[in-house]
Amino acid sequence: MNHCVTMLAMATPLVALALGGHSPTCAATGIDADQSTAAPDNTHAEDLIARLLVPQHGDLPEMRKSGIVRVLVEPSPTRFFLGDRRLEGFEADLLRELEKQLQKGQPKGDPPLRLVYIPMPLSDLLPALVEGKGDIAAAGLTVTAERTTKVAFTTPYLNSIDEVVVTSATITPPIRRLEDLAGRVVHVPAGSSFEADLRELSEQFHARRLSPPEVRLAPEGIGVEDLLQMANRGVIECTVADSHVARAWAEVLPNVRVLDGVVLRRGGTIAWAVRRNAPKLLAAVNAFVATAQSGTKVGNILFRRYFQSDPSARRDSDKAVRDFVRLAQRIAPTHGLDPYLLAAQAFRESRLDQSARSARGAVGVMQLRPSTAREMGVKDISTIESNVEAGALYLAWLRDKWFGEVADRPFQQANLVLAAYNAGPGRVRDWRRLAKRRGLDPDRWFGGVEMVAIEQGVGETVGYVRDVNRAYLVARLLAEMRVVE
């Protein structure tokens, strides 16, 4: 079974990727008495994931036509993590800047270009990229000779990176040189360049009749930062990390020792990867990297932000996110809604800020007008619970009143509801009529009704539906990986 689809069965509370808030432009005018209370299933998630993970081997022009560039990422407390109500990290911030640059070249008439993040274990990233299940791999990848036979690396965005040995302060006897690794247990992430370099070191030790180090691969989902924290607690004795990551974490982990003199690889470079048959994408990304690599203004700002500041402050930054998803899990099922989709929408609307107010009079995390809430039977939406309840009622009302005939296509129905929440149901009804006249599928958003919205210049709603979907995808996939438990 597809790894990413199986993730859905194990979802745990989590949120992701909040973007700027926008409010619906019209209020409901009536309510159906018969509200659906059917329990939600994983159809939306499965359809979305299946759509994104269908192997595609096109280059940038094909991606521009679809409006999507799929980015394979590894969750990491320094590169790609759940921060203050949005995705943060060195890679996440770089990718946001890349998205802005790619959007500037989007041809008129094509959908807005978006990067969609697909989290997965490090060991799966490059195989998935080669198989066409993603377009860019962004995970602090060291450029190696072996990897370059399989993928095309971009211009490096970090240079002069050493792979250093890091130990617990309690290790005995201490390690002072590479030869001291003989017979020692070294824990590293599976699929990392550290693993390959330790294997090569083992061969060298064999040739010198030294006992090779015992390489133990961390369980799936355990990254180098996790191993550094384990070394700090004395759970493991020894690991390997890139020098900039090791030094950042050593500032807040008092019981680890970064051994700058015990190095597996010196002067390494770190880059993103694309498929070898995507030269136009490679050229576009390289043009961006030239403006954001180490030594540039953007590159230096981001490096200082994530590798020269306290990373421990980021470990518990998702408490508000956890609390909101728990609230969504309590409210959404009573209205037949997917709690993760409800959460993703709230992030897009307000970044989970209950105090948010719009110029149009929308209030709270769901950016709902008080008049709309009253029509849903909720008189006061000043608390986060009542605001989410009113938003869920309104979503269920839109679904049943305006899109009930699309119930047999729940993925499309959910996207039409999202569009109606943002632009108003009457407007979406008009778009559907126009879509039908033009031979497009009026019951399908992506590539159907969406195209009419694009033609009419309603970019906000087009971007809104895509943003909520990509937030939802990241939330579901990261949840199964138990990045936050």
Image (spheres, rainbow, N blue to C red):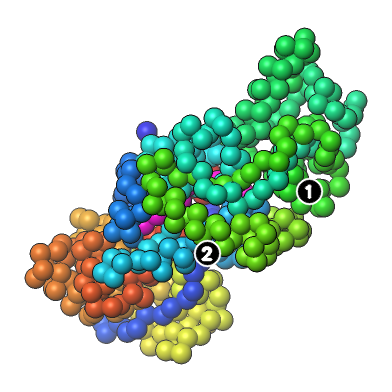
Dot 2: element: helix
Image point 66% across, 56% down: which residue? 294
Image point 24% across, 78% down: which residue? 456
Q: Which residue is mark 1?
A: 247
Q: Which residue is mark 2?
A: 97
The image quadrant that residue 472 belongs to is bottom left
Residue 218 visible in image: no
The image quadrant that residue 127 belongs to is top left
- Magenta segment boundaries in residue numbering: 68-77
Task: Give coordinates of residue 411: x percent, y percent.
Answer: 28, 57
| In this picture, residue 375 sits left or right of residue 439 | right
Q: Nearer the viewer, residue 35 or 152?
A: 152
Image point 23% across, 74% down: which residue? 455
Q: CA distance from mark 2 to mark 1?
A: 26 Å
Kindly identify the amino acid type of the residue bearing the numbered disc 2. Glu
Task: Give coordinates of residue 118: x percent, y percent.
Answer: 46, 49
Packing grade of label 1 (10 A; few <14, some 14-19, many >=20) is: many
| Quadrant of image for the N terminus | top left
Vertical arrangement, residue 58 with respect to residue 169, above or below: below
